[in-house]
Every structure is written in structure tokens, then in C-alpha cells.
Amino acid sequence: MGADAEEVIEDYMLTYCNFYGIEPGSEQYEEIADKNIVANLEKTFRISSIRDKDADLQGCAEAYLKEIGLSGEEISALKERLSRSY
């Protein structure tokens, strides 16, 4: 949906903050973000750094969705549904 890496990380980290009480900016927050969120996205997207300013996260996400079997039509429908959520 066009989010940059920090927005994606913050969104994932909301779960850790809300469910586990992890404090944003804490050492534990940064460790979870780096070792869980960042590492998993880099592995899934097959890129060296999601924080690289030239990383095409939207393109990587779409390629991943196609790889796991979603059609172009399904991806478009998902994007439409997500755009209404914001």
C-alpha cells in the first residue's frame, strides 16, 4: 500500500506493544523489530535490507502474494479492501 519500512515495522510492532506491553524505543522493542520483523521480511522478500531507500517493498509484497498463489485479480481486490481501511 506504499508504506515505507519504518511504517511497516511500527505497524507490526503494535501487536508486541499491545499484547506484550513492549515499550516503543526500548532495547527490547528494537531487538524484536530487528530479529523478528525485519529479518522475516528480508527473508520473505529476498532482499538484503528492507530499510534500503531503494527497496521496492510494494513490489516485493505483490511478488510474494503471487508466489503463494494469489491471482492478479485477488491482489487487486485485497489492495482495494485495504485502501478502504485507512
Image (cartoon, rainbow, N blue to C red):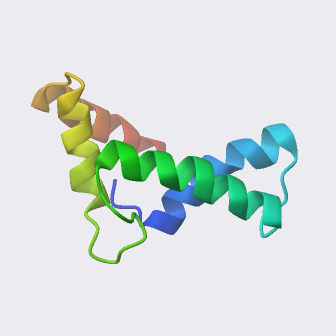
Q: Is residue 58 depicted above or below 83 in this figure?
A: below
- Residue at 69% across, 49% down: 14
Q: Is residue 19 depicted above or below 31 in this figure?
A: above
- Residue at 51% across, 55% down: 38
Q: Is residue 65 something one can see in this rendering?
A: yes
In front: 22, or 79? Answer: 22
Q: Position of residue 5 (x, y in %)?
A: 45, 65
In front: 43, or 24? Answer: 43
- Residue at 84% across, 40% down: 20
Q: Is residue 31 depicted above or below 16 in this figure?
A: below
Q: Position of residue 11 (x, y in %)?
A: 59, 52
| Relative horizontal placement of residue 33, taking residue 68 as reference (left or right) | right
| Relative horizontal placement of residue 4, taking residue 70 as reference (left or right) | right
| Relative horizontal placement of residue 11, taking residue 8 as reference (left or right) | right
Q: Is residue 83 something one can see in this rendering?
A: no
Number of callouts in the render?
A: 0
